[in-house]
């Protein structure tokens, strides 16, 4: 089913043979997509070296949110003992973190899409550093919960902004490789967190986990402040427009395109007149995106696999300590299997994403220019982005189900570790592919779109971590992970629906949006004429 290359009859909307779908059912943010005309000039004036520098900073900044969620795990027991609170109370610090990790990017992502990436990045890191410093010295449950909320609010926004930044200067034809590298450490950092956190807690005490985060984040903040250029296309266009002082890097001449700082060009046609209303963030745009048919399916698939991944991750400490008698540090080291698989998979998947794009374009008779933005409205994005996802989805399911049955028989530790490597690699691959696809669907508001994906998957992850221990107690470890594998199977028919009809839904959404923009333009012209 999934490997079919024949395009269904109702998919003939591609390449000019449009069928007008029922778009009235979809909820559409008014700035969710850009004009579908072909861009003739280079999409971005950033050089290859500048792009690599920016992606390196994005990778570093996006590392903190998922890393902070798990580096704290080895500290739960000592925090509980020192503060004199119950297990339920200390676990609230995990729940509050996950909730704000889901919600906060809807504001920061939207804010970066309107004001620019750089000032929002600086703001989120200042909040994060301050919260970590407070966590290192706090002495009460109330302070712990409030500061964990602030810590999550500061760090979680960086992930959505990173995806938005990447979309600012990369075309769909080259985006996979860059995103694969950028995702490598953030998607594997939840597995690295317990290792580093356990080592720090054992050597210097749990408070030094947060002092470590203060130092690490402060260094990153310094780099961002000095050498992170503004990329938001609403602010700098293709990079040739010099940004306002607030959006300008300290070392501007070294990190911004030469066209920007040398000429100081202020292309009036590229910088549209923006009102205060335009600049105010609207976090509900991220929520509205979820209700579009072409987007809701891929968000559901990503969230299901994310929930299954976190079910495996969250259950590991108790299972391995009971079965193998491992201490906290040994349990933390077991997470390296997830992390190693995730890093390798993310980089390889990025290459595969770009290869699939080129392959589908060639088969459709479309010449792809990696430097220019092609007309994506007629391009079969659904076929290109979903071409290889079926294999990694199947691989993930084929590892999750045996993982539970293997643990039920207490095998040599190498068996579950190998399966963890496969689960980590395949799951990261699924999430990477869908993340790229999501940005492609909303190129004018990529950070907002990413925030909607973050909202869905974090909510699913929070639910899975809260029920996994109950499931193992009631069903046993074997049937628990069989259940998660079967849930993941649902994603195959869901993605087949996206592959068959997603392009029609996307075109209908574009047409409805263009009609709305035209109505707004006419209204503006009438008010201006008056």
Image (cartoon, rainbow, N blue to C red):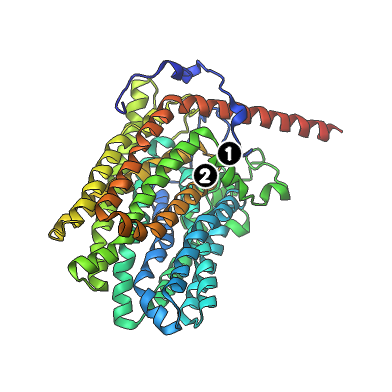
- Of the 4 image quadrants, the one containing the C terminus is top right
**Where is residue 15 drawn, in percent x and y?**
47, 19
Whether tag 2 and tag 1 are in contact, CB under 8 A, the answer is yes
Q: Is residue 215 above or below residue 176?
A: below
> According to the image, label 1 marks what residue?
32
Foreground: 385 or 392?
Answer: 392
Foreground: 129 or 475?
Answer: 475
Q: Is residue 465 above or below residue 451?
A: below
Q: Is residue 310 left or right of residue 415?
A: right
Secondary element at image label 2: helix
Residue 226 seen in this snapshot: no
Q: Residue at x 52, y 64 (%)?
A: 154
Q: Is residue 43 left or right of residue 1?
A: right
> According to the image, label 2 marks what residue?
449
Residue 498 seen in this snapshot: yes
**Where is residue 219 drawn, in percent x and y?**
43, 69
**Sequence order check, earlier mark of 2 and 1:** 1
Q: Residue at x 29, y 81 (%)?
A: 203
Q: Is residue 211 above or below residue 522?
A: below
Neighbor class of circle 2 (other Cα within 10 Å; few <14, some 14-19, many 20+) is many
Secondary element at image label 1: loop
Neighbor class of circle 1 (other Cα within 10 Å; few <14, some 14-19, many 20+) is many
């Amino acid at each position: 089913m999934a490997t079919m290359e024949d395009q269904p009859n109702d998919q003939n909307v591609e390449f000019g043979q449009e069928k007008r779908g029922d778009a009235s059912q979809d909820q559409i943010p008014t700035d969710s997509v850009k004009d579908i005309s072909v861009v003739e000039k280079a999409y971005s004036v950033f050089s290859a070296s500048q792009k690599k520098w920016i992606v390196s900073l994005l990778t570093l900044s996006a590392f903190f949110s998922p890393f902070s969620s798990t580096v704290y795990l080895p500290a739960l027991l000592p925090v509980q003992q020192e503060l004199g609170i119950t297990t339920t109370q200390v676990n609230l610090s995990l729940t509050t973190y996950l909730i704000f990790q889901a919600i906060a990017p809807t504001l920061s992502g939207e804010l970066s899409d309107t004001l620019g990436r750089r000032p929002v990045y600086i703001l989120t890191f200042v909040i994060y550093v301050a919260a970590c410093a407070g966590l290192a010295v706090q002495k009460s449950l109330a302070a712990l919960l409030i500061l964990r909320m602030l810590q999550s609010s500061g760090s979680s926004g960086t992930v959505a902004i990173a995806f938005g930044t990447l979309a600012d200067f990369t075309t769909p034809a080259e985006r996979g490789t860059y995103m694969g590298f950028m995702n490598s450490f953030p998607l594997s950092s939840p597995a690295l967190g317990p290792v580093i956190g356990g080592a720090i807690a054992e050597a210097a005490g749990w408070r030094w986990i947060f002092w470590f985060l203060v130092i690490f984040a402060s260094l990153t903040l310094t780099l961002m402040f000095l050498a992170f250029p503004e990329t938001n296309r609403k602010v700098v266009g293709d990079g040739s427009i010099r940004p306002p002082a607030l959006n300008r890097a300290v070392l501007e001449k070294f990190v911004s395109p030469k066209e920007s700082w040398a000429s100081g060009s202020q292309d009036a046609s590229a910088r549209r007149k923006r009102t205060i209303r335009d600049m105010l963030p609207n976090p509900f745009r991220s929520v509205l995106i979820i209700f579009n048919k072409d987007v809701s399916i891929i968000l559901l698939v990503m969230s299901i696999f994310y929930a299954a991944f976190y079910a495996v991750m969250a259950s590991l400490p108790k299972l391995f300590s009971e079965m193998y008698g491992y201490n906290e540090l040994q349990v933390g080291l077991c997470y390296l299997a997830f992390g190693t698989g995730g890093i390798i998979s993310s980089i390889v998947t990025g290459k595969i994403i770009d290869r699939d794009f080129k392959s589908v374009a060639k088969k459709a008779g479309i010449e792809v220019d990696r430097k220019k933005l092609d007309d994506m409205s007629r391009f079969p994005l659904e076929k290109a982005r979903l071409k290889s996802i079926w294999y990694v989805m199947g691989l993930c399911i084929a590892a999750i189900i045996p993982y539970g049955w293997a643990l039920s028989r207490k095998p040599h530790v190498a068996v579950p570790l190998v399966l963890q490597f496969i689960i980590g690699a395949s799951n990261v691959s699924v999430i990477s592919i869908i993340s790229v696809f999501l940005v492609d669907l909303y190129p004018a508001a990529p950070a907002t779109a990413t925030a909607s994906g973050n909202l869905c998957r974090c909510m699913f992850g929070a639910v899975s971590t809260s029920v996994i221990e109950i499931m193992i107690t009631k069903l046993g470890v074997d049937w628990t992970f069989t259940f998660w594998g079967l849930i993941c199977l649902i994603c195959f028919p869901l993605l087949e629906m996206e592959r068959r009809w997603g392009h029609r839904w996307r075109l209908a959404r574009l047409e409805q949006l263009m009609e709305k923009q035209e109505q707004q333009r006419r209204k503006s012209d009438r008010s201006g004429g008056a």
